[in-house]
Amino acid sequence: KANRLFHPDDTIINVKGRKIGEGTISVMAGPCSVESEEQVVAIARSVKASGATFLRGGAFKPRTSPYAFQGLGYEGLELLKIARKETGLPIVSELMSLEHLQAFEDVDIIQVGARNMQNFDLLRELGKIDKPILLKRGMSSTMQEFLMSAEYIMKEGNDKVILCERGIRTFETATRNTLDISCIPVLKQKSHLPIIIDPSHATGLSWTVEALTKAAIAAGADGVMIEVHNNPEEALCDGEQSITPEQFHKIMITVKKYAEFE
Ligand code: PEP
Ligand code: MN
């Protein structure tokens, strides 16, 4: 179902009037984790003013260490909804467990994180609901495995799948992961699904975000997902890769020269 052979036209996913995959660039920006109402509302307001089209924010966090901040959980989702009400930006948040599915009913796009890309039971259940799913590529998954995971969702009837490349593990240690830019043309050739690039998780370094955002747009991505924090140094998660609202604003001014935004 994800295969372009049987579906030559690009899939366009309409989320509250914002069309992902239509030829314009979708910009999903926001903090790695929702930390407080003030934090998420302030970030949402500023990224919206700079041209973001979606607000991202983690409430349930897949942290490597069980002692690290795990996210605000249900409260985080409520705070995201407040930020959505304040700005009108649709929200994207990660679902880690089917136990929480009901609480995501009012989330606009459900994110499946890299670590859950092959959680097939989760994918199957998300295939039974009518909601866009942002599926992140597993850090050690091939493009074929990535597409097969999309297939698990689509097989059950949900064809609103957005692919997201967020960097893969390679021998390189200068960056957290390696952004696989080649997956844009390859996945576009193999599949009709929209593809979003997450430069923040790809390198883990805030200063690379601008260059890789430009590269993603030049290579034909349908959008980007960027971590923005109003105080990256104090961020409870992923501060090193988060850019400030001011930096985000500058990037948006630059990239608007390269492509059409919503
Ligand atoms: C995230 O988006 O904050 C996240 C944890 O992403 P990934 O699953 O790509 O690591
Ligand atoms: Mn993060």
Image: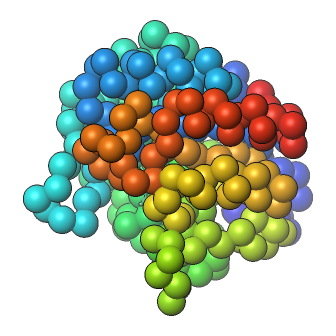
Quadrant of the drawing holding the C terminus: top right
Q: Is residue 137 visible?
A: no
Q: How many numbered discs?
A: 0
Q: Position of residue 57 (x, y in %)?
A: 40, 37
Residue for point 50% across, 72% down: 175
Task: Dividing the image into four quarters, tell me where ligand 1 lies.
Answer: bottom left
Front-most of 13 and 90? 90
Q: Quadrant of residue 199?
A: bottom right
Between 85 and 104, the one lying in front of the other is 85
Q: In this view, which residue lies farthest toward the left?
A: 67
Tell me the residue at 46%/10% (across/down).
Answer: 86
Q: Is residue 134 left or right of residue 124?
A: right
- Tell me if residue 96 comes above or below residue 92 in the rendering: below
Residue at the image position 68 percent from the left and 39 percent from the top: 251
Does 252 sit left or right of 117 as displayed?
Answer: right
Residue at x 59% of width, y 21% of height = 48
Q: Position of residue 232 (x, y in %)?
A: 38, 41
Q: Position of residue 18 (x, y in %)?
A: 70, 27
Tell me if 169 is positioned left or right of 197 in this view: left
Residue 207 vs 254, above or below: the answer is: below
Check the image and report above or below for 22 versus 108. below
